[in-house]
Amino acid sequence: MDNGKPDSNKPVLVLGIETTCDETAAAVVERRADGSGIILSNIVHSQTEEHARFGGVVPEIAARAHVDLLDGIIGRAMQEAGAGFAELSAVAAAAGHGLIGGVIVGLTTAKAIAMVHDTPLIAVNHLEAHALTPRLTDALAFPYCLFLASGGHTQIVAVAGVGDYVRLGTTVDDAMGEAFDKVAKMLGLPYPGGPQVELAARGGDPARFAFPRPMLGRADANFSLSGLKTAVRNEISRLDPLRGSLQEQDVRDLCASFQAAVLESTADRLSVGLKLFKERFGVPQALVAAGGVAANHAIRSALEAVAEQAETTLIIPPPALCTDNGAMIAWAGAERLVLGLIDTMDAPPRARWLLDATAIAPAGFANTRAGF
Ligand code: KG4
Ligand code: ZN
C-alpha cells in the first residue's frame, strides 16, 4: 500500500455482503494482479419461503431474517474460502439502494468487521455490483451496455468505467420482474411468478390476446409495464367475471400473450438504448443482461437478436451471478479498492441511491419509479 491506496498490481481478497432485499448473502472474491477475478465462496440464502405466503417481500420480515442469518452465512463464506478475517484486504457491503432495514443490517455488520480487524470498508451501490459482474465472469472491457431487469429494477445503463455510469433508460412504473410477479398473482400462480409465467407461456398462444406493446416506437429508451399489467387484469375479468377459476388453456394463453408483449416492448426499448449508447460511446463491447428476468429463455432469445442487430455480442452471467449475491458485492468492492475508493465509518445506508447521479426522470414522470 502507498498513501492508503493499494497497488492495483497486487492481488486483493474481499468479503462481500448483500442484504438489500430478500437474499442474505456473503462471498469471498479474489481480484488477481492481472485484473481477473476468482470466487472463493458464494453463499446465498434466498428468503423466498419466508415471504411466499404473503405473495411478495415483507420488509420487516426480511430485515429480521437478515439479522438471524447473516453471521452464520458470513462464517460459512469465510470457512469455504479458507480465509481468516485478518487476511482480508477489505470488507464490502451493499449500502443501497434497497429495503432500508436489510441495508442497515448488512452495512453495520461490515462496519463492525472492518473496525475489529482494521480493514478498509467499501460501501457498494447494489446496482453498481450488478453492473460490474461481467468483468468478474467474462473479464469484459469498458464500455458496455447493461440491461438490468429484476423484481426491483429495470434499467438500461452505459457502463463506461468503475463509478462512471450513464442511465439510458428506466421504467416509469413497475419493474419487469414485478410485472411478471403481479400477473402470476392475478392468475393464481405461486410466488415468485416469473418462472411460472414463463413455464405456462410455453403451452400458450401468444397471439390470442392483443395486449399493448408499451412505449413502442418512442425516441427515449424508457419502459412502462403497469398499463400492460392492467390490460391483463381486464382480460381476466372479462374471461372470468365471477372470479371462479380460469381454464388452464386460458392461463397459458394469457401468459404467452403477456410475455409476447413484454418481449416486443423490450426488444424495441433496447434497440433504442443501444442506439443512444452508440451515439455517445461507440459500439459497446457487449450487451449484458442481468437480474432475475434474464433467466427467462424467451427474453434471452429476443436479446440475442437485438445484440446481433447492434453488431455486438450478448453476455448473460450465470443465473447465480445474475440474481442478488455476495460475490458481485465483493467484486465491486475489489474494483473500487484497487482504485483507492475506500469509505469511512460514517458511510450511510441508503434506501435510494442512483447509479447515475445526473439521471433525471423523463418529463411527466417525476413522481414515478423513473426517479430511481
Ligand atoms: O434479481 P432477482 O433475483 O431479485 C431482485 O428482484 O433483486 O429477480 C427476481 C425477479 C422476480 O420478480 C422474478 O419473478 C423474476 O425476477 N424472474 C423471472 C424469471 N425468473 C425470475 N421473470 C421472468 N421469467 C423468468 N424465468
Ligand atoms: Zn439486484
Image (cartoon, rainbow, N blue to C red):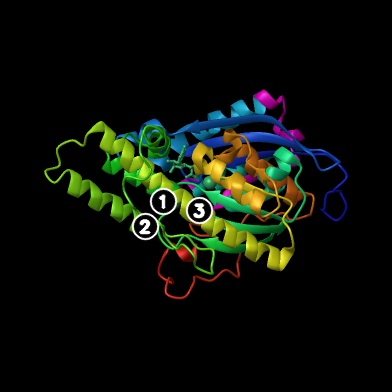
Q: Earlier in the sequence, mark 2 or mark 3?
A: 2
Q: Residue at x 58, y 52 (%)?
A: 147
Q: Residue at x 49, y 65 (%)?
A: 217
Q: Amino acid at mark 1?
A: Ala
Camera-side mark, 2 or 3: 2
Furthest-left residue in this view: 242
What stretch of residues is rendered in magenta? 80-102
Side (left or right) of 348 relative to 248:
right
- Label 3 SS: helix
Give the camera-side residue of 262 and 144. 262
Give the camera-side residue of 182 and 123. 182
How far apart in space, not on screen, are marks 1 and 2 (Cα)? Answer: 7 Å
Q: Which mark is residue 266?
A: 3
Residue bearing the label numbered 2:
212
Residue bearing the label numbered 1:
261
Q: Amino acid at mark 2?
A: Pro
| Res 225 seen here | yes
- Label 1 SS: helix
